Image (cartoon, rainbow, N blue to C red):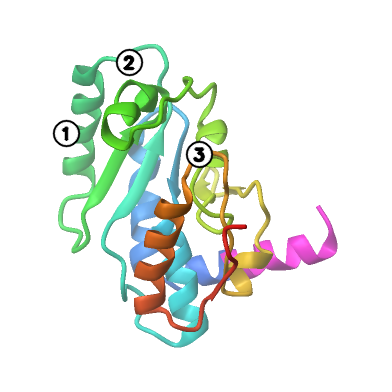
Amino acid sequence: MTRSDEALRDRLIGIFHGSPLLMDVIRRAQSLGNCPYYVGAGFLVQTVWNQLTGRAQDYGISDIDVVYYDADDLSYAAEDAMIAKGRELFSGLTIPVDLKNQARVHLWYGDKFGIELQPYVSLEAAIDSWPTTVTSLGARLTADGEWQIYTPFGLQDLFDLTLRPNKALISEEIYIAKTQKWLSKWPELTVVPWS
């Protein structure tokens, strides 16, 4: 990790600590159990954008993504049990939590989005395929209070307010729809064209 990468990581952690909502979610997520998990994607990114653009901390955040990885039981019943646990764990939050087992995404993704997936081999492999370089981001606190942050494309785009496609999975149409939605809330964003 370069000095610049370390500085951005420290800045990211500082923003996280400045958000009572985000820290509440991160701390509650520590109770999910032994399976690997991350709080991820838009919730983290939009918290940073809000801080950088002077908006309220929860502005524009429609849901909170919490992802975990359990390849030992790919049944809907097992994921549903985890979702029920999450409902209890995250009760009282004003923003809904979307809890998903990334080990079973391949079982429903094709039907929902028309793109067939191979099973993800890890939670990080799932994050590697998320739609943009900025939203390919996961964070969690270990039991001893250490941050684990996974960001396969680095943090520069996030702090530069730049949207860049991650073409591993999404189509140009999906990218355009997402960027238009985000631009309607954060017009300061710079969108890198698909091609």
Q: Is residue 68 above or below residue 174?
A: above
Q: Is residue 11 magenta?
A: yes
Does the residue at mark 2 contact the one at mark 3 (Cβ under 8 Å)? no
Q: Which residue was labeled with disc 2?
A: 74
**Which quadrant does the C terminus fall into?**
bottom right
Q: Which residue was labeled with disc 1?
A: 84
Q: CA distance from mark 2 to mark 3?
A: 21 Å
Res 169 label: 3
Residue extending furthest toward the top = 72
Left or right, 173 with respect to 88, comes to: right
- Magenta stretch: dominant SS? helix
Q: Please tell me which residue is depicted at 26% across the width and 15% down the height of the picture.
A: 75
Amino acid type, mark 3: Leu
Q: Secondary structure at mark 1?
A: helix
Q: Earlier in the sequence, mark 3 or mark 1?
A: 1
Q: Is residue 61 magenta?
A: no
Amino acid type, mark 2: Leu
Crowding near pointer 3: few (<14 within 10 Å), some, many (20+)?
A: some
Q: Position of residue 168 (x, y in %)?
A: 57, 40
The residue lying toward the viewer, choosing from 42 and 18, is 42
Of badges 3 and 1, the one in the foreground is 3
Q: Secondary structure at mark 2?
A: loop
Amino acid type, mark 1: Ala
Q: Is residue 18 above or below residue 178?
A: below
Q: Please tell me which residue is depicted at 33% across the width and 65% down the height of the picture.
A: 21
Q: What are the residue bounds of the magenta stretch?
A: 1-12
Q: Earlier in the sequence, mark 2 or mark 3?
A: 2
Q: Please tell me which residue is depicted at 41% across the width and 23% down the height of the picture.
A: 103
Q: CA distance from mark 3 to mark 1?
A: 29 Å
